[in-house]
Amino acid sequence: MTVVGPFGLSVRDQALEADVQAGLAAVEEGLLEATKSDVPFITEAAQHLVRAGGKRFRPLLVMLAAQFGDPHSPGVVPSAVVVELTHLATLYHDDVMDEAEVRRGVASANARWGNSVAVLTGDFLFARASHILADLGPEAVRIQAEAFERLVTGQILETAGPRDGRDPIDHYLDVLAGKTGSLVAVACRFGAMMSGAQESTANILTQYGERLGTAFQLADDVLDIASDSHESGKTPGTDLREGIPTLPVLRLRARAESDAGTPEDRALCELLAGDLTDDVRHAEALAGLRAHPALEEARQDTIRYAEEARATLAPLPACTSKAALEGLCDAVVHRAG
């Protein structure tokens, strides 16, 4: 049993472990190569988050999905680089929108160089991803374009908020499917497609990735509230401080507005609706949410999506790569406590 990838995923097959480790090492080299520029400052800014590390969750999924075909096919590693570059680019933009100061345990690009440099560096990474993508064929370009549209749409919907009459929780889950699920789904599809796996297998893995991606983000929501030391390197309660309603907050609001709502529920909602840039109020809000049943409800939502992801894998034949994908479902649930 060897530990590879994010969350200490356990792989019990030496051949699979070797393939995954070699693939991830090649992706790392590809990321450094793709972020080089003739302008040293651009290289420094573009490699800022690459060198800060990260889970490499999406490349890992590419490698595992590729096991259902030929994992050594030439398009597998470049497609993983494309997906991770796209993810990294969105982080540069997200940090500007959130005014974040820390990312992956280091100063965010916007905190270090300002918003303009951070936004343009994200654009640079998108450009480099597109350059690699062009060599993978028109179908890959189409899949990536559709996913990117969904990703941006999810971000816009999050910013705009739910339309009148729409359940805020349903709206939020749709946002996550676009913002996070779409790119995780592409990672699984690219791995299967580039390895020459059957179309039916690629479709199953795409559905798995969408659900796992949503569960992954929901686990982040829970961790952002529940963890004193956020394993993503972000400051705990970042979304809370910025007034971004994640699932625990939405579950609290729903409870407060229901017939079962208590004065304590409504008081906590009022606290969350106030100015949480004040450290004392922010700490009080975090403590209140940590002790509230809404956090456990959000944790159960995470488990539900992870189990749905696992269920989509049922038609695939039993093999070590399928077991590893099922293990990722367990790992996501474990992250959420």
Image: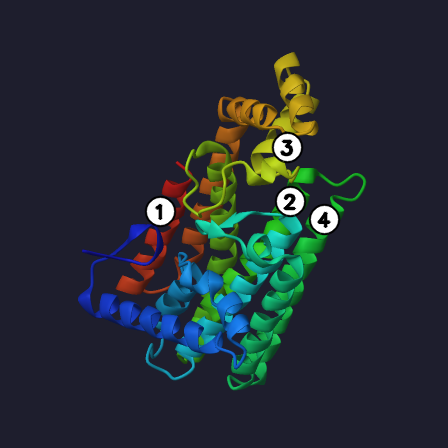
Identify the amino acid type marked 3: Thr
Task: Please tell me which of labels 4 and 2 falls first in the chain.
Answer: 4
Q: From mark 3 to mark 4, how far is it between C-alphas?
A: 19 Å
Residue 203 appearing in the image? no
Question: Which residue appears at 51% of the width and 44% of the height?
Answer: 218
Q: Sequence-wise, which precedes: disc 3 or disc 4?
A: 4
Residue 144 vertical placement versus 54 (above, below): below
Label 4 environment density (alpha carbons within 10 Å; few <14, some 14–19, many ≥20): few
Q: What numbered label is drawn on residue 172?
A: 2
Q: How much space separates mark 4 and mark 1, taking CA atoms? A: 31 Å
Circle 1 SS class: helix
Q: Position of residue 173 (x, y in %)?
A: 61, 46
As helix, strand or loop, the secondary structure at mark 3 comes to loop
| x and y, in percent, of residue 260 in the image | 64, 17
Above or below for 246 versus 27: above
Tell me the crowding category of disc 3: few under 14, some 14 to 19, or many 20 or more residues within 10 angstroms, Cα based.
few
For the point 50% across and 72% down, the residue is: 43
Any mark on residue 40, and which?
Answer: none
Q: Are marks 3 and 2 in contact (CB under 8 Å)?
A: no
Amino acid of disc 1: Asp
* Residue 277 - label: 3
Q: CA distance from mark 4 to mark 2?
A: 11 Å
According to the image, label 1 marks what residue?
330
Label located before the other in sequence (2 or 1): 2
Near mark 2 (Cα within 10 A), the count class, few <14, some 14-19 or many ≥20, is: many
Pick the front one: 22 or 256: 22
In the image: residue 41, left or right of residue 322: right
